[in-house]
Amino acid sequence: MTELGTYLKEQRETLGVSLEQIQSTTKIQKRYIVAIEEGDYKQLPGAFYARAFIKTYAEALGLDVDEVFETYKRDLPEPETQPVVELSRRATYSKSTAPKKSVAKRWIPNIIIIALIFAIGVALYYGFQAFQDGDDTRTATPQQNEVTIDEGDAPSKETNAPAEEPKEEEPAKEEEPVKEEEKKPLAAKTTAGQDITYEVPTDETMSVSIRIKKDASPSPFVGVRDTSLEGEALAPDHINASDPNPIVVKDAKTDVIRIRVGSIKGIDSIIVNDQELKLNRSLLVQNIYLKKVATP
């Protein structure tokens, strides 16, 4: 057994994920996963597939693949080298001594095409100018007929002036409703390694909504339990992208809720009692504790 295989197995068991769940998430056969954990790469289809399987396995556990590959590079199977194909002397000679087309023969067709395009453009321009000039000579400006108005027919200013209409009072402006202040995201109270604690001010129960990104690849592992890993599950564990999203817990009567997240990059938001948490994106694997405290 290699150090890399031991490390991956320990991380999987810490998350509480079985081999069957990893097989369902990564689409890698169970016997290949066991071979990776035991360091028996001969059971895998080849060195290329071995490295690809290890990368997918590490991503499913929410690990930093580059860091894993750098730390355990001695345990990784060596990549397969591709054979170098050398050209024969005859092929090399034929390529280097092949007759090249002269510069003139290559450019003559292009010059002819450019000249034709230029000639067509000039002809179209002069034709358009001749058509516009002829159209201007045929168009005459019509003269306006003079119209005289008899003063006797003009309306009297006194008799025909319209009566002034009373001005309408402007409607009173409605007062704009005062907008409620938006709740700021709830910041973490304490952080110790992978354990992050949030204090939720409430005298009643706690309701939680965990929304997972639709394009998360691989889909993160999420488990919600009462107080600890061994406590009662408050919602079904999320393993695959086909599992229910968002994960919802309503009116939990416990004082502490524990959320185990396998890859924080795949989490869109976590909302507790209509207040969003300010998530720490620097830790891939987290134990998020929601601790109920009395309201001030």
Image (cartoon, rainbow, N blue to C red):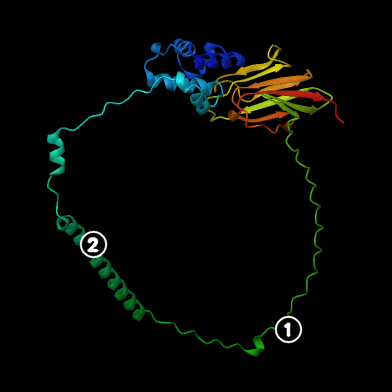
- From the top left corner, tell me how far across and down residue 114 is, in percent: 23, 62
Of the numbered discs in the image, which one, if any, rests on residue 16? none
Q: Which residue is drawn at 18% across and 57% down?
A: 109
Identity, as a three-letter code, of the amino acid under mark 1: Lys
- From the top left corner, tell me how far across and down residue 223 is, in percent: 64, 18
Q: Which residue is drawn at 20% across and 61% down?
A: 111
As helix, strand or loop, the secondary structure at mark 2 comes to: helix
Image position of 185 (left or right of 141) = right
Residues at marks 1 and 2 touching, judged by CB atoms closer than 8 Å: no
Task: Tell which of 248 and 43 is nearer to you.
Answer: 43
Task: Tell which of 280 and 119 is nearer to you.
Answer: 280
Q: Quadrant of residue 62?
A: top right
The residue positioned farthest toward the front in the image shown: 74
Q: With respect to residue 39, does 100 lie above or below?
A: below
Foreground label between 1 and 2: 2
Cα–Cα gap, marks 1 and 2 = 74 Å
Image position of 137 (left or right of 209) = left
Q: With respect to residue 96, does 272 lie above or below?
A: above
Identity, as a three-letter code, of the amino acid under mark 2: Ile
Q: Residues within 10 Å of mark 1 (few under 14, many from 20)?
A: few
Task: Tell which of 254 and 59 is nearer to you.
Answer: 59
- From the top left corner, tell me how far across and down residue 90 is, in percent: 12, 35
Q: With respect to residue 240, does 116 lie above or below?
A: below
Q: Which of marks 1 and 2 is nearer the N terminus?
A: 2
Instruction: Check disc 1 and report the residue beneath it.
Output: 157
Quarter of the figure with the C terminus? top right
Instruction: Check disc 2 and report the residue beneath it.
Output: 114
Q: Which residue is drawn at 54% across and 29% down?
A: 216
Q: How crowded is mark 2: few (under 14 residues within 10 Å), some or many (20 or more)?
A: few
Instruction: Count the labels in the image.
Output: 2
